[in-house]
């Protein structure tokens, strides 16, 4: 069965975006960018909320940007054909290899898990991930923890009404002092 993963950059105090809506502190260095590129290779489909979808639209045409280096062109070449499912109540159409979700999050994940296919089902965006977590649908949390305290904003981990036990699967410390933590939900 395909795993549902939630992976993002996060401040040490637990936020993916600061109180000023800024996340420039998550800009990866070359080593972290290579790691994230390798991680996205393992994804079979990416679920996104509207805000993250709109942020990531750049990558649909990034291969036409002459200023991009080889590693960014490689990312674009992986991202562009990756199937994406966008959850939005305000968008009427999406671009690239994306489709609007036809059902609720639980129904979409259940359908995607039942389909033949390889690669993880990745969730991007804190709001969508919070909904998936509340429904008990996330199998792995993958945090790239940046050495910064932003003091508030959008939290990586949703507020929970129940305890969730996790098993540490992998850690890695990058030269930039970013620490990668990969946890599997103990079931």
Image (cartoon, helix red, strand yellow):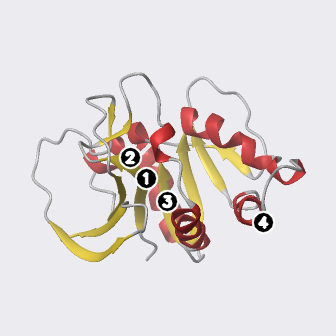
The residue where tag 4 is placed is: 70
**Residue 122 at what x, y percent from top left?**
49, 59
Vertical side of 58 occupied by 176: above or below: below
Q: Nearer the viewer, mark 1 or mark 2?
A: 1
Q: Nearer the viewer, residue 105 or 185?
A: 185
Question: Which comes before the other along the chain, label 1 or label 4?
Answer: 1
Q: In the image, what residue occupies the spot 61% across and 72% down?
A: 41
Give the side of residue 17 with respect to residue 97, left or right: left
Give the side of residue 18 with respect to residue 185, left or right: right
The part of the image, by quadrant, that contains residue 18 is top left
The residue where tag 3 is placed is: 122
Question: Which comes before the other along the chain, label 2 or label 4?
Answer: 4
The residue where tag 1 is placed is: 8
Q: Nearer the viewer, mark 4 or mark 3?
A: 4
SS at mark 4 in the image: helix
Vertical side of 18 occupied by 16: above or below: below
Q: Which mark is residue 129?
A: 2
Residues at marks 1 and 2 touching, judged by CB atoms closer than 8 Å? yes
Q: Is residue 4 visible?
A: yes
Distance from disc 1 to disc 4, alpha carbons, whole Å, reads 22 Å
Question: Which comes before the other along the chain, label 4 or label 3?
Answer: 4
Question: Which comes before the other along the chain, label 3 or label 2?
Answer: 3
**Residue 84 at what x, y percent from top left?**
64, 53
The part of the image, by quadrant, that contains residue 42 is bottom right
Q: In the image, what residue occupies the spot 54% across and 68% down?
A: 31
Question: Which comes before the other along the chain, label 1 or label 2?
Answer: 1
Give the side of residue 180 with respect to residue 95, left or right: left
Distance from disc 1 to disc 3, alpha carbons, whole Å, reads 10 Å
């Amino acid at each position: 069965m395909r795993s549902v993963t939630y992976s993002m950059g996060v401040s040490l105090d637990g936020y993916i975006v600061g109180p000023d809506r800024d996340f420039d502190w998550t800009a990866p260095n070359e080593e972290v960018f290579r790691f994230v590129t390798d991680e996205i290779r393992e994804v079979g489909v990416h679920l996104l909320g509207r805000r993250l979808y709109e942020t990531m639209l750049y990558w649909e045409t990034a291969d036409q940007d002459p200023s991009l280096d080889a590693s960014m062109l490689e990312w674009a070449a992986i991202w562009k054909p990756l199937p994406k499912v966008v959850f939005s109540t305000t968008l009427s159409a999406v671009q690239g290899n994306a489709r609007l979700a036809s059902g609720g999050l639980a129904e979409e994940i259940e359908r995607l898990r039942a389909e033949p296919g390889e690669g993880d089902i990745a969730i991007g965006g804190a709001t969508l991930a919070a909904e998936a977590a509340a429904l008990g649908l996330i199998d792995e949390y993958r945090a790239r923890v940046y050495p910064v305290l932003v003091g508030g904003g959008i939290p990586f981990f949703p507020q929970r009404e129940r305890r969730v036990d996790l098993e540490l699967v992998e850690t890695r410390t990058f030269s930039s002092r970013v620490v990668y933590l990969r946890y599997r939900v103990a079931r």
